[in-house]
Image: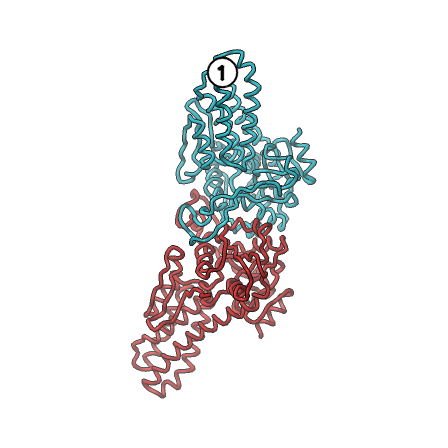
Chain colours: A cyan, B red
Amino acid sequence: MHTVEPIQWTPAGVVILDQLKLPSEVVHHTYTDYRDVAKAIKTMIIRGAPAIGVAAAMGIALGVQHSEAKTLEDLRAEFPIICETLAHTRPTAVDLFWAIARFKRRFDELAPAASRNGAAGLDGIRTAMVQEALLVHEERRAGDRCIGKFGAALMPKSGRVMTQCNAGALATAGIGTALGVIRVAIEEGHQIEVLVPETRPYLQGSRLTAWELHEDGIPLTLITDNMVGHFLRTGGVGAVVVGADRIAANGDTANKIGTYGIAVLAKENDIPFYVAAPISTIDLSLPTGDQIPIEERSPAEVTHAAGIRTAPDVRAAHIAFDVTPHRYITAIITENGIAHAPFAPALKDLVQR
Amino acid sequence: MHTVEPIQWTPAGVVILDQLKLPSEVVHHTYTDYRDVAKAIKTMIIRGAPAIGVAAAMGIALGVQHSEAKTLEDLRAEFPIICETLAHTRPTAVDLFWAIARFKRRFDELAPAASRNGAAGLDGIRTAMVQEALLVHEERRAGDRCIGKFGAALMPKSGRVMTQCNAGALATAGIGTALGVIRVAIEEGHQIEVLVPETRPYLQGSRLTAWELHEDGIPLTLITDNMVGHFLRTGGVGAVVVGADRIAANGDTANKIGTYGIAVLAKENDIPFYVAAPISTIDLSLPTGDQIPIEERSPAEVTHAAGIRTAPDVRAAHIAFDVTPHRYITAIITENGIAHAPFAPALKDLVQR
């Protein structure tokens, strides 16, 4: 199984698959300016919290690599600007801030030695930043595979598994979180078909998940978001597995709009509901989901579909995420292991592992 | 409040609002040939079971009015052709056959007297058929208003009410069933905003419900179908009111896909869930919802939105209706009164009233 690559570090620059053009066109952009990487994050050419983390890491590395700074002091002055530019892209993406903080720490670690080595020290920092970005990507791939391994054991041996939005390779730059669980389960011999809700208004389900599963040869059936209940009640679904944008200390989970509804309908029909997400998604500073900020986006996405106006000029709401209270979640699957209820101690334990 | 009219009998002919062109264009067609009315039903220029019943009635009246028959015998030969033409439009619309049967009965009632009166008798039948069509329309309006009156008392005094699909004036040629309840509540002083799910794949919510509410000046917010859960949990929704395609003897209700999910999410959040539908929707011959046939339509509607391809060439399911088990339904509102659980005796009683 060859999984699609949404972002790659290459000698020519950072190569990003344009997710806005999928599935009708498969277009890759090669960026050499970090500002273009920031723009790609902001405009959702690349999306999905973990992939945004990788993109931010590569963006910072690109900024440092191509910086015209001649001295460490110049670079030290420019570095926060690079970081700020990448920070001002997607406010809900926790991996973005995690990646930026990591690069700031790494920069501060390297600076004292670099400052003693002149031009060689400056080059050393440039190289180290690129290595750090490659390491972030490699950790992401390894993390997804661990999530997949832990989660596969929870998947049914046969039948259907429902997901939501795109928590796949396109979202993480690995094998995916939710889709990574499904991929590993299939590698291990499970006979699974994936039910893919289209996930309006951006249609990440139909445009991205259906595309990447189809590319991998994984069987799927695409449905509209309002068919979720019907299929959970009558469609032979053995499990639901979704990603997460942020998980509070008590297990409450923010994810793509619609996730809460799926979770309630899964519970109502005695179907296990799993969240698969990297440890970086867990925010122990937030006691509950009530403290998770919910991103609202342009209502024009709701009054339009595929760019075509579908409604009169009326008020529309575009809530991009919802919060699923932990009581609807059967388990949270991370690269460090699986958390079951009570989630507060279990998540704390996983984060500290 | 002036409610939109999907169909009207006028001296110039039958005027039908083109629902295929909404909301981008408001186009009315004036038909003087009953074959054009049949075509309008078939091509879904007019849709919604009760509105189709009114259209069939007006189509027959138009056919009789414009018939070139010089004698009753000529008209008696032409009448079944008119009826057949209207019958061959939407084979599953129960109101269509109900309207045709009613006109056949009425014709047979009038024919003996007419045959004794020559040309005056022929004119009398023409006039009577037109009166019958106006009566069908008037009864539809009155039925909706009764549903509205009964239902309005169940609506919150202020806040939000959620609906699904289009159970409005456009679907019934009255004030609507679910939207009729909301209209009467507003007339009676309730301060209500309507939450309108767009209702993929056909988008009856965004194209039709949002349009007709906006035309009436009723406040609304359009949402995507996957925002339903978020708004029921956090959006100040005081009630849900939806229409029905068929109601089984035990209260299980088939309605537009997505209705079941809304009902479960409403119950989970302690929000009353109401079904508003004419008595003709209740089918006492079906013991439970399991016996209601569920229509599947073209998967191309799911892989496309607004006519644009949004998914790769993958398998898709297009389930057009779902069944909401009666345990999620707070009450069923009809023109004869309100049924509460246990629904079996309550519905039987209402049907016999």
Q: Which of B179 and B112 is in front in this view?
A: B179
Q: For mark 1, what is the residue?
A: A122
Q: Which of B237 and A331 is in front in this view?
A: B237
Q: Going 45% across and 46% down the picture, which residue do you hit?
A: A301
Query: Does residue B65 appear left or right of residue A250 in this picture?
Result: left
What percent of the width, then of the height, locates residue B324?
57, 58
Please report, as a chain letter, where disc 1 is located: A
Under circle 1, the secondary element is: helix
- Look at the image and tell me in which quarter the C terminus of chain B lies: bottom right
Q: Image height check: is B348 above or below A238?
A: below
What percent of the width, then of the height, locates residue B212?
45, 60
Residue farthest toward the bottom in the current orientation of the protein: B116
Amino acid beneath label 1: Leu
Query: Does residue B345 appear left or right of residue A92 in this picture?
Result: right
Q: Image height check: is B319 above or below A123?
A: below
Crowd rating for badge 1 (residues with CA inside 10 Å; few <14, some 14–19, many 20+) = many
Res B178 visible: yes
What percent of the width, then of the height, locates residue A220?
50, 43
Res A55 visible: no
